[in-house]
């Protein structure tokens, strides 16, 4: 399995999970033109191949704002055309998208199959209805969890069974406290339905020890309230047996999931 991370953070989130002939687009916070440019820079092309399915974690703009333009650019099936390629959980309103395109429900109680990729979703704590994803294909498992203000043992189990996890480490509490953000925004970020601090992410990674040993790639770092090496150091301290790396804000990268050493 290969994951094309096209961007993470408040400026826009998008990734493509690829296995064999199947591609699943995840989150639509980056427009198709920028996505195509970034994917080409990583060594592949978005067009004309396109994708076989689209899912989003939640409706906030940095994860969902480009869903309609993406549907147009990829010529996804129009409403009532059958064969949907957009799959949305009930917490994503996306009225214009649901009016214009064929949209199928994404269940949190049963896996979704898109080509050769199985997609699983679970609720996580955020101030909009939000899910974490797990993708399975060709013996590999990839997890994706961002925009959550608190975590649970069940989420640790969900992610701990993965080979690789793309996981939020949004802020350093001391940097957030010293930032020029309004007090209301600081409270939102640090709330149980806001975002994970480095220390909270470290706790979650520590809890995965009961369920597996995933490689962890940190993402969705705040530009002003975190630093990549600080986040990596704090989270890496939680488990010496887990590889921890960092994607800086807006950085693109290819992740090979489940590939044997060498």
Image: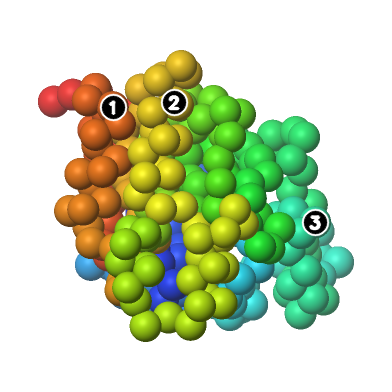
Q: Label 1, secondary structure: give it.
A: loop
In the rendered image, residue 44, in percent from the top left (x then y), is placed at: 29, 59
Q: Nearer the viewer, mark 3 or mark 1?
A: 1
In the rendered image of this protein, does residue 5 appear above or below residue 124? Answer: below
The picture quadrant where one finds residue 153 is: top right
Taking the spot 27% from the left edge, 56% from the top edge, the residue there is 247
Residue at x 57%, y 59% (from the top left corner): 191
Residue holding disc 3: 90
Which residue position is annotated with label 1?
Answer: 239
Which residue corresponds to mark 2?
Answer: 208
Kindly identify the residue that appears in the image at 80 percent across and 56 percent down: 90
Name the element at disc 2: helix
Q: Position of residue 95 (x, y in %)?
A: 79, 76
| Residue 201 on image: x %, y % | 40, 43
Circle 3/circle 1 CB separation < 8 Å: no
Mark 3–mark 1 Cα distance, whole angstroms, equals 36 Å
Residue 231 shows in this picture: yes
Residues at circles 2 and 1 in contact by the CB criterion of under 8 Å: yes
């Amino acid at each position: 399995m290969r994951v094309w991370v096209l961007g993470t953070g408040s400026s826009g989130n998008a990734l493509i999970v690829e296995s064999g002939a199947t591609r699943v687009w995840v989150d639509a916070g980056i427009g198709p033109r920028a996505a195509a440019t970034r994917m080409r820079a990583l060594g592949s092309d978005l067009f004309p191949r396109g994708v076989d399915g689209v899912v989003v974690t939640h409706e906030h703009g940095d994860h969902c704002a480009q869903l309609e333009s993406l549907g147009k650019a990829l010529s996804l099936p129009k409403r009532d055309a059958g064969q949907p390629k957009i799959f949305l959980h009930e917490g994503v309103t996306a009225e214009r998208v649901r009016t214009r395109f064929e949209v199928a429900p994404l269940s949190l109680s049963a896996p979704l199959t898109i080509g050769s990729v199985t997609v699983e979703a679970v609720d996580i704590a955020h101030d909009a209805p939000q899910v974490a994803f797990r993708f399975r294909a060709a013996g590999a498992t990839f997890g994706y969890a961002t925009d959550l203000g608190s975590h649970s043992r069940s989420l640790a189990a969900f992610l701990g069974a993965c080979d690789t996890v793309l996981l939020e480490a949004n802020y350093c509490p001391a940097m957030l406290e010293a930032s020029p953000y309004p007090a209301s925004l600081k409270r939102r970020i640090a709330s149980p339905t806001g975002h994970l601090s480095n220390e909270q992410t470290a706790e979650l990674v520590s809890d995965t020890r009961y369920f597996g040993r995933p490689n962890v790639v940190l993402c969705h770092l705040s530009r002003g309230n975190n630093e990549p090496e600080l986040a990596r150091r704090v989270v890496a301290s939680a488990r010496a047996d887990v590889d921890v790396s960092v994607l800086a804000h807006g950085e693109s990268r290819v992740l090979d999931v489940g590939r044997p050493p060498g």
